[in-house]
Amino acid sequence: MALISALALASGLSACTDDEGPAAPFAPVYGGIETRLLDGDLVQFDVAMRGARGPGDVEDYAQCAAAQYALIRGYGFARHLRTNVYEEGGLWRGDAVYTISAALPRGLRTIDAEVVAAACAENGIPMV
């Protein structure tokens, strides 16, 4: 019984930080995606959102846009080149550049567009 009470107490405290109460639920507001074809297979995605927990959420949003864009264009893959993220007054913006291709591109930061798009849909992240 004491073990169960200790576990319940520990799990209840795990959502708290030293100076704050329980973490607020993640409830992002996605502000839209702008897509620009830069050259051939090189595409830029500008995304905006509020309620991001950090740069990773903005990067995920841009990746979802890239995955769906690749699929719309009839390609199955994308390679991440760069993402710049900044926040001002609670508005997070990301500027990401990807190449899209029919075959798996060389490099370490490649994505399978179908797999990523399915994960984005499952997680409620909007796409192009």
Image: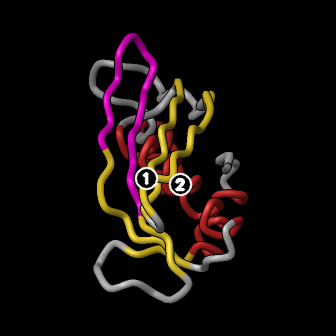
Relative to residue 98, is residue 51 drawn left or right?
Answer: right
Residue drawn at the location 46% of the way across and 87% of the way down: 104
Residue drawn at the location 45% of the way across and 37% of the way down: 15
Number of labelled discs? 2
Q: Nearer the viewer, residue 54 or 8?
A: 54
Relative to residue 21, is residue 116 drawn left or right?
Answer: right
Numbered tag placed on residue 38 in the rendering: 1
Query: Where is mark 2, residue-wise?
Result: 4
Residue 116 is situated, as x and y percent measured from the top left of the image, at 58, 68
| Disc with the residue nearer the chain's start (1 vs 2) | 2
Residue drawn at the location 46% of the way across and 56% of the way down: 43
Nearer to us: label 1 or label 2: 1
Instruction: Count neighbours of disc 2 (C-alpha within 10 A) and say few if under 14, some if 14 to 19, many if 20 or more.
Output: few
Residue 69, can we see it?
yes
> Magenta residues?
84-98
Q: Amino acid at mark 2?
A: Ile
Q: Amino acid at mark 1?
A: Leu
Which quadrant is home to the N terminus?
A: bottom right
Residue 2 is situated, as x and y percent measured from the top left of the image, at 48, 51
Above or below: residue 39 compared with residue 46: below
